[in-house]
Amino acid sequence: MLTTTRRGVMAGGAAMLAGMAVGQDAQAQSRRILVMASNQDIPNFDPHVANGYSASMALRNTYDSLVGVAGNPPKPVPQLAQSWTISDDGREYTFKLDPAAKFHDGSPVNAEAVKYSFNRLLRLNRGNAWMIAGVVDQNSVEAIDATTVRIKLVTPFVPFLSVLPWVWIVNPAQVEANKGSDDGQAWLRSNLAGSGAFRLRRAEAGNLYEFERVADAWRQGGGNLTGAIWKITRETATQRLMVQRGEAQIAVDLTSEDMDSLKGRSGVNLVIEPEYRTFSMKMNTRHGPLRDANLRRAIACAFNYQGMLDVAGYAELMQGPFPESIDGFDKELPIYRTDLARAKEFLAKSSTPNGGIKITVAHVSGLEQQRRWALVLLDSLRALNIELDIKPMIWPDMVSAARSPETTPDIFMVYQTANYGDPDNLAFAGYHSSRNGGWQNPTYANPEVDALLTQARAESDAEKRRALYVRFQRVLMEDSPDIFGVLEKRKLAMRNNVQGFAFTPVASNAIDLFPLSLG
């Protein structure tokens, strides 16, 4: 059984990493170790609790799911399931598991493990549970035999196959042996019970996470990596320099200026691609002054959107919660743009008609783009006589702060990258009240929005489904829970010796290690 802790250090690995950190790239490449520079720490290793792109990177490489995702546009591809069939009414899915699939301890990944994993995710109702909650229940997953799983949906759900790459399968025996009083959460926070092509060799919170390829992993093929390192690098300029010097092979958080600086650099390839990636400033609708909808509307009208766009680089302004390219986008949605006269009208109707208050905005420490947008917000609020306290925070602390309205900052900056190309992804995760207490939607709750989104998940008629999402967007804009910011293109920089990378416009910064090689 693999055991790892967030403080664990292996002496030999520590010496190797120290050398790599100061630029001994030749040693890393001789062992085919891929170094990824990221701003974001990994807050949790429990596959049914953790989410966010850093956790998704770790989990998609150490665990497996029934299906994977690949291509552009993204499509479900076999993983644990070799094949599947769907009933005519779209409510019953039958999966045939690969008989070679095995967990890291050598035990088979069987239908009972799939059933256990779905039911545990539903019990905990955390992490990615929102993707399947209300769609399946504790009686939905049936183990027909060791390698056949039948899933009966409680209600039709159009993107069901597309969410399955983010439902990871755990080893029931290991979790049950360490179940404790919390369904194994304490143990899985720092231990793995997966079947993925990589295992976690060591974890140092705030510094690095080292992965190593499982010597006898069940999946055949893939790239030649022997290991990989997720190196926490707070400043984007440092990430850029690491790729430029060959100290890292991939950087995932670069600004537009960083990308421009790397253009034409020998040995560096740039990926600049559109994807369903939104950036918004979520307002605390349940605690503090921004409970007042008129104050939220005033801020939305006072914000300098052109100033935001000017520092955004490869981006365009959002027109509500959806990208224009996604099905259900409302082309005639009334949106907020900079209008100080209108902002002051809303302010006059609020509980603080003359301003004179101080609010807090939190952003991810080291993300230069977010810091600049906070400065744009600070300048914008001066016109309303509102003072802004800018608070940089590391990502795990932001996740923790979002757990209650009382600890959530007044304004909470969030990138949301779609895990599947359906409006449900951005809408349900970002605005359904069941997501309250999570970083995607710390506080916003509206019963009408909940009803619309729940109905839209189950609506198989395309036109009726679009109409539900149009109504959702209208209600949301009236509530004004967010400052809708920009749609950024995904920006990745990588050394030209990285082979096997293929861009997919969902979770593209949660790097899939399996197909990658170092040349």
Image (tube, grey):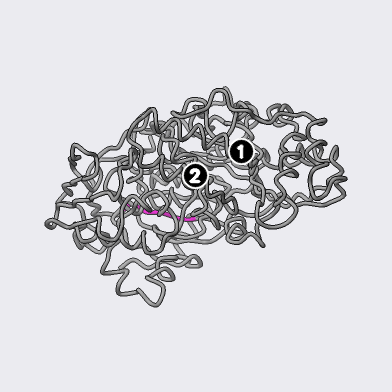
Residue 147: x, y in percent? 14, 53
Residue positioned 20% across, 61% down in the render = 112
Taking 340 as reference, is 322 left or right?
left
Taking 511 as reference, is 63 left or right?
left
Identify the residue at the far bottom of this view: 181
Magenta highlight: main SS: strand
* Residue 495 vs residue 391, the one in the foreground: 391
The secondary element bearing badge 2 is classed as strand
The residue type indicated by label 1 comes to Leu
Q: Residues within 10 Å of mark 2 (few under 14, many from 20)?
A: many
The C terminus sits in image quarter: top left
The secondary element bearing badge 1 is classed as helix
| Magenta segment | 209-213
* Residue 503 vs residue 430, the one in the foreground: 430
361 drawn magenta: no
The N terminus sits in image quarter: bottom left
> Can residue 195 be seen from the camera position used here?
yes
Residue 331: x, y in percent? 54, 23
212 drawn magenta: yes
Query: Where 137 falls versus 329 (above or below)?
Result: below
* Residue 411 vs residue 275, the one in the foreground: 411
> Can residue 269 be seen from the camera position used here?
no
Taking 251 as reference, is 358 left or right?
right
Of labels 1 and 2, earlier in sequence is 2
Q: Name the residue under label 1.
A: 241
Q: Determine the image quadrant of residue 488.
A: top right
Residue positioned 63% across, 36% down in the render = 484
Q: Mark 2 points at which residue?
A: 36
Query: Where 126 falls versus 412 (above or below)?
Result: below
* Residue 409 vs residue 474, the one in the foreground: 474
The residue type indicated by label 2 comes to Met
